[in-house]
Image (tube, grey):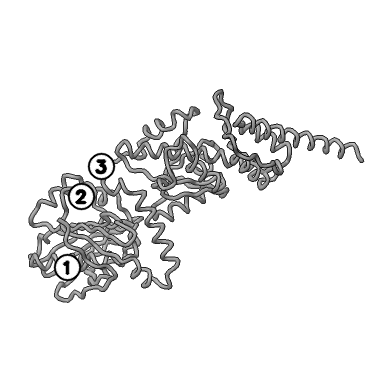
Amino acid sequence: MPQTATAASADEEASSSRVDDLIQRGRSQGHLSLSDLRTAFERAGLQPAEARSILRELSEAGVRLADEETTDPKPAPRGKAKPAAKSPAAKATAAKAAEGTAKKTRAKKADEAAPAAGTAAKAETTGGSDPEIAEDAFRNHPEMLLTQSDISVFVANWNDKAENLKAIATRLNIGLDSLVFVDDNPAERARVRQSLPMVAVPELPKDVAHYVRCLADAGYFEAVAFTREDRHRTEQYAANAERESLFKLSASLDDFLKSLQMSVAYGPFTAPDLGRVTQLFNKTNQFNTTTKRYSAEEIAHFAAAEETLTLQFRLLDKYGDNGLVSAMILRPDSDHAGIFEIDNWVMSCRVFGRELEFEAMNIAVEYARRRGSAAIRAAYIPTSKNGVIKELYSSLGFTALNDRLVRDGDTCWFLDLAKYVVRSTHISQLAEAR
């Protein structure tokens, strides 16, 4: 045998022996250093699939993997069979997997701290791990404060994290500029900053103990008010995932909407919901007809003004309460008696495509008629984000008033209530909210 081949074979045997020694040490001590594992795996030239297999076996045997060996390791559980080690390569990937799980755990704890302080936060996992290993941390780690049900979108894989963030935003139906990416790897942070500049990427301190303070000080999750919808946001996103699954199984859109068994609770703005109404007008960008923003005091003034017509809408279905998802402010036209003008109308993107805009207009028309109104006037002021509702008023039966253009791109619309045809929807009306 050539001398070079002999030397290489000897190196491989020594590397494999090193991996075996680490495995045995980990099983006897109950913990292993990830850095030691990485080095051993690289020297042994192990493949990712082999590394995953070995790490899974170590996890099942109760071996704890950490960035550094602790002085007070937790012993491996007794009474468990210790499966034989497979090819040493499965650990390399598994080491990265455990590393990714640690990142997610820290991100989740930071997200958990925000709601406790009176703010709303969503938790998402973005990758760098095998699903089984990442999920195991939530199920079995004795110090894990969160459960998987606390996570709005759980993604654990080896895909590019920037692509995972795009998928998460799509799943939640929110903009990428609403996401905060937390990762302890500087290279991953730089990659996301370069690929997705609209995503917030905080620069984390070296000490893990300061992560939560870093996020809190950045103010990412600060809010003017903490509403009932904020408190149940995670459950609402989980319910939306069920709706998505139902949609994929439905033969048609009509079948999907029928099977949701939707209903709407509606009525004028109520005192307990003024915070949420204010939040809707100030945070909604896509379904926002004029993009007017209002202070809490202005919303309270509209609610109290007898001449103003205010409406709020809460959409429910068989999966639960979507929350207060739409609001409308109609004011008397100062130039023409008997005409209401929609000052602004907003709707959460979470309920797009559910026909709520049609049922909301049915309700608004009925309220306007009760007030003695003969018509409703409205404006659409385009922005870079609300193009999705460019044809909204046309679809609701309004007629364009080209002579009432305020500026290029803006359109004004008119609805004769005597000619309004009630839109048929899959949403039933509940008793008015009080």
Element class at badge 3:
loop
Q: Residue 91 location in percent, x, y? A: 65, 40
N-terminal label among 1 and 2: 2
The residues tagged by marks 1 and 2 sit, at their Cα atoms, a distance apart of 22 Å
Other residues around mark 2 within 10 Å, as few (<14) / some (14–19) / many (≥20)? some
- Mark carried by residue 273: 2
The amino acid at mark 3 is Ala
Of residues 289 and 173, the one nearer the viewer is: 173
Gap in Å between the C-alphas at discs 2 and 3?
11 Å
Q: In which quarter of the view is residue 424 placed?
A: bottom left
User: What residue did someone put label 3 on?
Assistant: 225
Q: Residue at x 69, y 45 (%)?
A: 47
Image spot of residue 422 (x, y percent): 21, 73
Residue for point 62% across, 29% down: 29
The residue closer to the viewer here, 338 or 106, is 106
Residue 214 lies, with reference to residue 430, above or below; the image says above
Relative to 214, is 372 on the left or the right? left
- Say few, some or many: other residues with alpha carbon within 10 Å of mark 1 (under 14 / 14 to 19 / 20 or more): many
Please say if the residues under marks 2 and 3 sit with CB atoms less than 8 Å apart: no
Percent coordinates x, y for residue 238 in the rendering: 39, 53
* Mark 1 lies on residue: 365
Q: Secondary structure at mark 1?
A: helix
Q: Are marks 1 and 3 in contact (CB under 8 Å)?
A: no
Q: CA distance from mark 1 to mark 3?
A: 31 Å
